[in-house]
Amino acid sequence: MQGVAQFNAIGTFYKQTKKETFFTDITNAAGTGWFNNNSDTFNDGGGVFTGLSAGCACIYASSGGIQSLPVILDVFAPPAPAPVCPPCPTLAPTPTPTPTKKPHSASTPTATGPDATTSGVMLWSARTNAPVVAMAAGPAGQLYYLSADGYLYALSPDGRELFRRRAAGRSLLVGSGGTVYYLTRSGFLAAMAPDGVRQWKLRVGKGAGPLGLASDGSAIYGGADGGLFSAGSDGRLNWHVSFLGLRTLAVSQDGGLVAENRDQAVAFSADGSEGWSASPWSASPSGGIAVSGDVVYAGAGDGLYALSLAEGTLLWRYGLPSGVSAGPVAGPDDAVYFGFAGGLEARGSDGSLLWVQKGLQLAEKTPLIPGHGGTVVVGDYNRAAFMERNGAFRWVGARFPGISAMVLSEGGILYIGTKSDRVYAIR
């Protein structure tokens, strides 16, 4: 069954020069987000929603830091009776943010805390010069992102550009104190302060990354020129070893790391000495790799693998015909989250199922990030979904065409980058 509903969003504006209030239809505006709490209710563009199965959904629009009142949508096929839908959650007031003339300092909080993500408020959107490749958030909510045009951009929490620097690669990091690490196009690993002042650069050889950071911030790991390197936070090279075809890496709590290429996963200690190597999968690796406690999680075309961090031996395997397409990423309480073609799952460190949500369509390299307190945020083509600890949808937001990167700041602002040359900020 399918049912279609059309909603419109009208914005109220005040023109200071003429001292008058006027109204504008913002249903299809780039800065308008449409949200609901049911993944089977799809937003087809603007305020058009299609219900794929019988049920209930709370639908609302948000723009400029303001959120509309929700509307209950009942989906059913007569002569079946209409579902009994509970009231939509009461929304907290969302006053329009007041822009400031100066960038926020590193000590100024810009959000009300992690719980602010409960409502799904569209703060702002901004056009980029090219598709967004990767994102990171600073300690005061600043957004840093790599663009396909070869630059690293910094935006304030209210969406203003602070600076840009020439950069390369597919990842960047924000370390302790807000230091930003990135690879330059000329083959250097560079570090800069939150205000954009370069602190140092170290020649590591041309490469696309990825990058990883030690838990104490003392070392940066990355790939370049067919090898794997470690650099200190002071800009000195610690070591460089040969490692061809680096796909991804994950850093453990003790400062070691696990690196993966198309053939195997290899463990390295903090001093660069090689430990175990393993290739337990019968299909090519897919998704990524993650370390949580004493377990290494690796995605492959035939499922999810859990290896011992100490020895690299196989602990368990969960088979998936479609393979792992997103993640894995480690969450609290030893949970691991991963996506597949039909949805998203959470499992414990022993492989036990915590929850599964099949209302998403996750493609290869779909952004998946752990949230606060066991929540998880995932990008689904042109939708972003915020999941509760038990796997229920807190909200699903649409109108983000071609999601390519996401990051959740410590203050609770979710930044979304897209392949369609746009970034969004949601609280």
Image (tube, grey):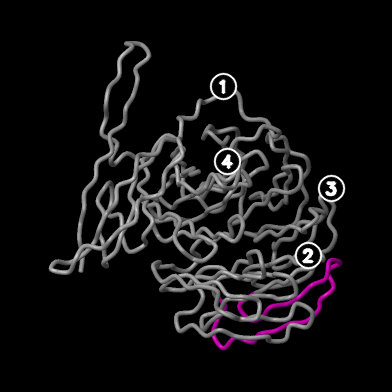
Single out the mark in the foreground, 3 or 1: 1
Q: Is residue 399 above or below residue 140?
A: below
Q: Name the amino acid, label 1.
A: Lys
Instruction: Using the numbered discs, state the Cα–Cα distance from disc 1 to disc 4 in whole angstroms.
Output: 19 Å
**Residue depicted at 60% across the width and 47% down the height:** 409
Q: Earlier in the sequence, mark 2 or mark 1?
A: 1
Instruction: Check disc 3 and report the residue beneath it.
Output: 234
Residue 63 point in image, percent of width and height: 39, 37
- Position in image of residue 138 (x %, y %): 65, 43
Separation of marks 4 and 3 at Cα, in angstroms:
23 Å
Q: Residue furthest top?
A: 18
User: Where on the picture, by quarter, is residue 245?
Assistant: bottom right
Q: Which mark is residue 314?
A: none
> Disc 2 designates what residue?
253
- Contact flag, marks 4 and 3 (Cβ < 8 Å): no
Instruction: Choose top left, top right, bottom left or bottom right for residue 11.
Output: top left
Prevalent SS, magenta region = loop
The residue pinned by badge 1 equals 101
Region of the chain picked out in magenta, as a range: 261-285
Label 2: element kind = loop
